[in-house]
Amino acid sequence: MRTFYVTTPIYYVNAEPHLGTAYSTIAADVLARYHRLKGEDVFFLTGVDEHGENIQTLAAEKGISEQELCDQMAPMFTKLWKKLNLSNDIFLRTTSELHKRGATKFLNALYKTGDIYKGKYDGYYCRRCESFYTERELAESKNCPVHKLPVEWVEEENYFFALSKYQDGLRAHIRANPEFIQPESRRNEVLNVVESGLKDVSISRASVSWGIPLPFDQTHMTYVWIEALCNYITALGYGEDGEKFHKYWPANVHMMGKDITRFHAIIWPAMLMAVNLPLPRQIFAHGFVTNQGEKISKTKGNVIDMDTLIGEFGLDAFRYFFLREFSFGNDGDYSQDRFVLRYNADLANDLGNLLNRTLGLVSKNFGVIPEPTTPGEFDDEVKGIARETIDQVDALMGQLAFDMALEKIWEFVRRINRYVQQTQVWSLAKSEETKGRMGTILYNCMESLRTIAVLISPFVPDTANRIRQQMGLDECFENQGLDTVSEWGGLPSGKTVGKPEPIFPRKDTKRKPRHAASSQTEQIATENLISIDQFQSMDLRVAEVIAAERIPNADRLLKLQVDLGSEKRQVVAGIAAHYSPEDLVGKQIVLVANLKPTKIRGIESQGMLLAASGKKELAVATFEKRLPPGTQVR
């Protein structure tokens, strides 16, 4: 059986966990759950770093011991982990004997290489980071690049690791293994640092008393960043040369925020090289979450209240939003409006509506999952898209492209909603002659929902289980891997379905419209205003025109064939007076994708394009740069 080992950063206990903490850990949890779905033997590590000068200082301020402080802080993380429904296999504390034994063994091994030596350190030091910085990293301000506060000039006798010795080896490894550091922007940053020249790094502090002593000199405490990095192997029993270490190391993914890439992508790999241990396969440094364009901080008062969000919208909506809304490798900006829009559009409208309407029709007309006895139009297309979706999601999850993987799943959700509309399945109950066709369509919808439930289970595990329960499928997802949906038709007919209940009740935004900025601007009559709910109910998509032709005996009409990525559609548009067919082929347009199909001059139109029109002019809405067909417009 293949193994998969994923780690979060080891979080410092000098402050309570926050949204950034949750963001990294949820992402690692999704990855762990997904690889379990693939049938792999997964080990998921997270934990807390409890040593160093900051802990020593904070404990003194509180008048308690360092261990007492750590014992107070660590449960805050485990409580949040439980609230976030995380599936970690271990929660490691660096004050544990397991870690101390492993770190001591690693330091001894490092010392025996001859790459540790004693010397005098002088340099710029940030006490909050517990990090040393070069003048280049501080720029002209001489402020910490993370905290933006002045750094101190520190001089003391320390032990050093000969990092410079491994400069060429690191550069060669990074160049030979493009996936080693991701995303590409982080890889380039690290490569620039390595190629500009590495200096030896301090690995001890003589002025700090709270930590793990160097095994070869008990008067020096190991620099917190050095022993903290060891957690990735100590959690596997490296100190005991344990079975888990040999089974799971090297890690498949070290997950972290971009601010700590330097330690993980330069210092940690170099130390592993020194002791002849395999390097982690990938270091993935994600971006930060901002709040309406500003860095989140207590000082600014813009901290995102996780408890309130989860309490109002539910945990799964919280998990879904932060992995769907942002590209994982880049910074992402949070807004309450975007959260509500995502919730109502994706979860309540798309997924919730599909489940409710399908189960409602099955319950009313059959009571049990019907048999697929009467194939017809669109069935093969739906089955093909299901297979494609599974393959596409697997490829995207391998890239940690969580937002794109979710978009692929939701394209399938929206396609099944359109399948219901195209077949007008509700109308087939009127005659016994069409009842078989109705049952087949509903079976296909139920089988699609089963596939969707499996695919979304790493992201929104509770929702996935609720879908299965309402479908009458009681098995837990530990027994429902990707292999169970790899072939169409695994859903058993004849099972009694559960009672359909809304899994994501819609939220009423009740937001006031913004007033115009200038009194000279023409005011819009209040009776013409629509709610934000009404606007977000429209599914606007990038569509590429792949063919166009005039419609005989219709001077104003053109028939277009458009590509939506996952499907192709036919659209009739009244723009022939302004565009010839050849003008449109290759153009990317905005399509209202969830408009009910209609017939114009006897020709079916499966959507509507957007255009601006004046008294004499008309221009089709398009884009300044090309986008993948099917991209959502919002």
Image (cartoon, grey):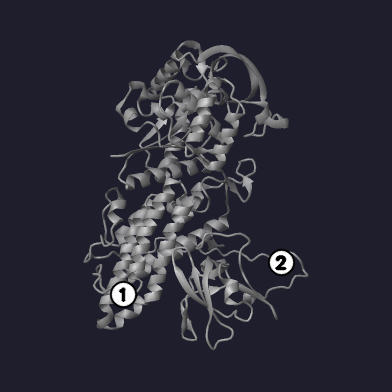
Secondary structure of the residue carrying numbered label 2: loop
Residue 405 percent across, percent down from the top left: 44, 53
The residue sitting at 52% across, 59% down in the picture is 628
Amino acid type indicated by mark 1? Gly
The residue sitting at 44% across, 13% down in the picture is 112
- Tell me whether the residue at label 2 lies in contact with that at label 1, contact meaning CB atoms closer than 8 angstroms: no
Q: Is residue 492 above or below residue 284?
A: below
Residue 423 percent across, percent down from the top left: 37, 76
The residue sitting at 45% across, 69% down in the picture is 568
- Is residue 143 in sight in this rendering? no
N-term-proximal mark, 2 vs 1:
1
Q: Which is more toward the observer, 454 or 296?
A: 454
In the image, which is nearer the foreground, mark 2 or mark 1? 1
Q: Which is more toward the observer, 387 or 306?
A: 387
Q: Is residue 428 above or below residue 179?
A: below
Residue lying at the far front in this picture: please name it.
Answer: 582
Residue 328 percent across, percent down from the top left: 51, 47
Secondary structure of the residue carrying numbered label 1: loop
Q: Is residue 386 above or below residue 226?
A: below
Task: Provide the residue designation for mark 2.
Answer: 516
User: What crowding class fits label 1: few (fewer than 14 Cα within 10 Å), some (14-19), or many (20 or more)?
Assistant: few
Q: Which is more toward the observer, 181 or 634?
A: 181
Task: Provide the residue designation for mark 1.
Answer: 376
Q: Which is more toward the observer, 412 or 432?
A: 412
User: What crowding class fits label 2: few (fewer than 14 Cα within 10 Å), some (14-19), or many (20 or more)?
Assistant: few
Residue lying at the far right in this picture: please name it.
Answer: 520
